[in-house]
Image (tube, rainbow, N blue to C red):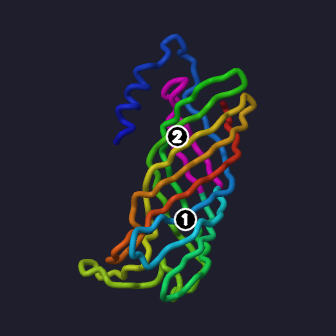
């Protein structure tokens, strides 16, 4: 994993003269999101950018004063516009969970701290509001020849990278911008194109024990 050498470098730069430095902190953040899919040529299923809402919590391990490793989870609600030649245009509301593990670099200023980070994420879809005939997460397109389980039009799991920029005030309040780029093709059947997810989230949060 790309974070391992960075983690080792950060840990080797600990301030030995600060034996009482804080080890962990935690916080909450949330805000609106803009999400959608990038589709490849000759694809039969695509979407327009749609709005949603994320609510998240994180736990940060302080490798050093400037390097923090976060473990964060976010519940999200997304309203996605799906288009296909078969079923036309329709809105799909999904409920999901994000788990991400960014390595954060902190750059102190006079009034607070700039935050820059990146790391892997995974996303799970565990609910939606469209009946099974129109919902691409439940529309069966084939059967797995090995397990015999049905294959649906869209995968309910994807993963990729989360890129983060933000600012944390001395009071503990923070502003945060997350950009998630998915590397998992969501099309769960043989197709000429591809469908990759993306999401941008603007959050207001608070860091406890900062």
Q: Pinpoint residue 195: horizontal percent, then vertical percent.
A: 43, 68
For mark 1, give the secondary structure.
strand
Q: Dot 1: few (<14), some (14–19), or many (≥20) neighbours within 10 Å?
A: many
* Magenta stretch holds residue 201: no
Nearer to us in this view, 99 or 84: 84
Mark 1 and mark 2 in contact? Answer it, CB < 8 Å: no
Q: Residue furthest right?
A: 171
Q: Is residue 72 above or below residue 126?
A: above
- Total labels drawn: 2
For mark 2, give the secondary structure.
strand
Residue at which label 1 appears: 36
Residue at which label 2 appears: 70
Q: Pinpoint residue 199: horizontal percent, then vertical percent.
A: 55, 57
Q: What stretch is highlighted in magenta?
A: 55-74
Image point (47%, 52%), residue name: 121
In which quadrant will I find the C terminus? top right
Q: Which of marks 1 and 2 is nearer the N terminus?
A: 1
């Amino acid at each position: 994993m790309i974070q391992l050498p960075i983690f080792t470098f950060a840990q080797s730069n600990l301030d030995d003269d600060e034996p009482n430095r804080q080890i962990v902190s935690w916080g909450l953040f949330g805000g609106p999101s803009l999400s959608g899919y990038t589709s490849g040529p000759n694809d039969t299923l695509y979407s327009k950018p749609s709005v949603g809402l994320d609510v998240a919590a994180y736990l940060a391990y302080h490798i050093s004063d400037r390097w923090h490793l976060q473990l964060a989870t976010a519940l999200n609600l997304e309203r996605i516009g799906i288009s296909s030649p078969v079923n036309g245009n329709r809105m799909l509301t999904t409920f999901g969970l994000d788990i991400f593990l960014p390595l954060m670099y902190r750059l102190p200023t006079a009034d607070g701290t700039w935050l820059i980070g990146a790391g892997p994420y995974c996303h799970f879809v565990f609910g939606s509001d469209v009946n099974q005939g129109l919902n691409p997460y439940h529309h069966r397109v084939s059967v797995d020849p090995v397990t015999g389980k049905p294959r649906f039009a869209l995968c309910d799991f994807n993963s990729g990278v989360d890129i983060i920029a933000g600012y944390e005030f001395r009071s503990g309040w923070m502003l945060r911008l997350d950009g998630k780029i998915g590397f998992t093709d969501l099309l769960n059947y043989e197709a000429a194109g591809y469908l990759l997810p993306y999401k941008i989230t603007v959050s207001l949060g608070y860091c406890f024990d900062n």
